[in-house]
Image (cartoon, grey):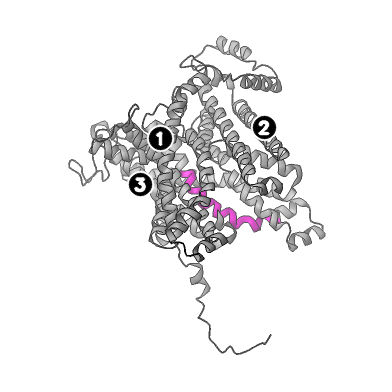
Amino acid sequence: MRQYILRRVGYSLVSLFLLSLVIFLFVRVTGDPVSLLVEPGASPEDIENMRRQFGLDRPLWVQYWHFMASLATGDLGLSFYYRTPVLELYFQRLPNSLLLAAVAMGLSLLIGIPSGILAAVRVGGFWDSAGKIFALLGLSLPSFWVGLVLILFFSVYLGWLPSSGSGTTLHLLMPAFTLGWYFAAAHMRLTRSSMLEVLGSEYIKLARLKGLPEALVIGKHAFKNALIPVITLAGINLVVMINVAVVVETVFAWPGIGRLLYEGITFRDFPIVQGVVIIGGGMIVLVNLLVDIFYALIDPRIRLES
Amino acid sequence: MTVTTHPVVATAPTPPTAFWRLQGFPLIPALILLFIAFVAVFADVLAPYDPQIGSLARRFRPPAWQEGGSLAHLLGTDHVGRDVLSRLIFGARVSMIVGITAVLVAGGIGTLLGIVSGYLGGWADQVIMRLTDTWLALPALTFAIFLAAIVGPSELNIILILGLVYWTRYARVIRGEVLSLKQREFVRLAIVAGCSKRVIMWRHILPNVINSAVVLATLMLGVVIVTEASLSFLGVGVPPPKPAWGLMMADGKKGLMVGYWWLTVLPGICIMLMVLSANLLGDWLRVKLDPQLRQL
C-alpha cells in the first residue's frame, strides 16, 4: 500500500515537473518572453532593464531554476493591470468559482444521475434515446451559445433573470445551468454504463430471485454501487469546472477564475494567464492523485495489481 | 460432428454486404456535412455580398421575414452593416479549414507518438505516456488560451494550437491498439524477415491503426470546431474582420440586450448543426468500422 502511494506521488511529481517545463518552454521558445512580461508600449531601455531583471539574458537552465524557485514559494508574478500578486487575485476570485462550480455540479448530477438510471433500466426504450439526444446536445452545443440564448429568452424577452453579474441566487441560475449541462451529459453516460454493469451482476440476480420489488433492487442494491464511479468523476469534474468556466463566466460576467483569465487576455496581462494555467494544471494533477489513493484505499485489487 | 452439404433449415437471408454496411447510416447528418462543405468550397459564388465590408447606413437590419427586414439581406445585417448570410457562408469555410486541418495536425502528432510509444516500449513509452498524462492535466480550453496569448491570434496559429492541445486522445488509443498488434503473427514475421523497426512501424503497424485514427478524427472534429469558436468568441481565435462563426457571436453579443437575436442565434445554429452531424457520423463510424472503439 505504502509502495503504491509512493509511486503515485512520484508520478504526480513527474507530471508537475513536466507541466512547469512545458509552460516554461512554450513561453520562451515561441517568442520573446519580454514582450509578454513587459507592458505593451514600454521603452527599449525599460525592456532591456526588464530582460536583466527577469534574468532572461542568462542560460535557459538558470532561468528555469529561478522560475521553479519562485513557483515553490507561491510567487506567480505581479499582474500588470491590478499591480497585485497573481496568487492574491486568484484567491480573491476562487470563492466565486467554487460557488458556481458547486451549483453547476449539483444541477448536473440532478439531471445526469436520474436520467442515466432511467436509460439503464429501460435500455433501448424511449428514455434511453431521449437521454442520448440530451447528452449529445449537451456535448455539441458551444456553452457560450447556450448562455447567450438563455440570456435572450430569460433576460431580454421574459425579463425574469438578470443577464450578468453576481450577488443573488437568481444571478447563479443561468451560468450554473449552462456550465452544468455539458457535464450532465458525461454524468449521464457514466451512470448509465455503471448501472448496466451492476444490474448484470450476480448479487442483483439474487436480489431479484429473492423476490424483492424492482424499485428496491434498483433504488437500493444497484444504485449504491453504481454511484461510486459517478461520484469519483464528479469530484474530478468539480475541479475541471473551475478551470473551464472561462467562457460561461465571460458570457455572464461572473467574477470567478475564468473571468480573471479573460481579463488577462483582453488587458494583455500575461502573468495572470500563466498563473491561472499553472494553478489549474497543478490542481488537476493533485485531484487525480487523491482519486488514485482513494481508490486504492477502498479497493485492494487496485493496489495489488501493479 | 456431421458435415451437411444441403442445409435442411434455411437460414434467414443475409442482406447484401453493401446494405449491411450502410445500416443505420446517419443520412441527414452526412447530408448536412456535405452541404456545409459545398457551401465552404463555393462561398465566393454563393455569398451575395462581401463578408468583410458593410455599410453603416444599413446596420442592424433584421432578417427578411421580420418587420423592417428586406429581401436584399435575407438574414439581416450586423453592427457594421455586413450581410449576415454572406458571413455565415464564408464562416463555413473558416470552420471547415480550421476544423479539418487541426484534426489532421492532432491526428498526425498523436498517431506518431502512439505508434512509437506502443511499439518501442521501454523508456520511450514511459516518457511519452508521462507527457500525455501531463497534457491531460491541462484543461484544454485554458491551455489553448494560454498558447494563443503567447503566439497571438491568426488562423494558422489556431490550427497549430488546436493540434498541439488535442493529440493526447489519439496517442492513448493508438498506443493501446499497437500494444495488441505487436503480438500478432504478421508483425513477428516481419521481425523475423529482418525488417527494421521503422519499416515495421511505418508499413505494418500504421495501416492497421488508420481505421481508429479516422474514427477518432470524426469524433474530434466537433470538439475542435467548438474550441475554435470558443477561442474566437474570447478574442484569441480567428482575428476580425474574418467571418468566423465564434467571432460573429462575440460581435452579436453587443446587440443581444436590445433583441437583435439573429446575430447570435444564427451562427450558433450553424455550429450546432455541424458539430452534431460530425458527432453522429463519428458515432456510427465507431460502431461500424471499429468494434474495439465501442467503449470510448
Q: Residue B54: name its quadrant.
A: top left
Residue position for label 2? A13
Q: What residue is shown at x 41% (from left), y 33% (from top)? A: A100
Q: Residues within 10 Å of mark 3 (few under 14, many from 20)?
A: some
In contact (CB < 8 Å): disc 1 and disc 3: no
Residue position for label 1? A248
Q: Residues within 10 Å of mark 1 (few under 14, many from 20)?
A: many
- Mark 2 and mark 1 lie on one chain; the one further toward the N terminus is 2
Left/right of residue B41 with respect to residue B187 in the rendered view: left
Q: Amino acid at mark 2?
A: Leu
Do the residues at pointers 2 and 1 share their chain? yes
Left/right of residue B108 with respect to residue A240 in the rendered view: right
Q: Amino acid at mark 3?
A: Ile
Magenta span: predominant SS is: helix
Find the distance from the CA under tag 2 to the CA under tag 3.
44 Å
Instruction: Write the start and end of the magenta stretch as one range.
Output: B203-225
Q: Residues within 10 Å of mark 2 (few under 14, many from 20)?
A: some
Query: Residue B97: image x %, image y %?
Result: 48, 45
Residue position for label 3? B269
Q: Residue B246: name its quadrant.
A: top left
- Determine whether the residue tagged by mark 2 lies in a helix, strand or loop: helix
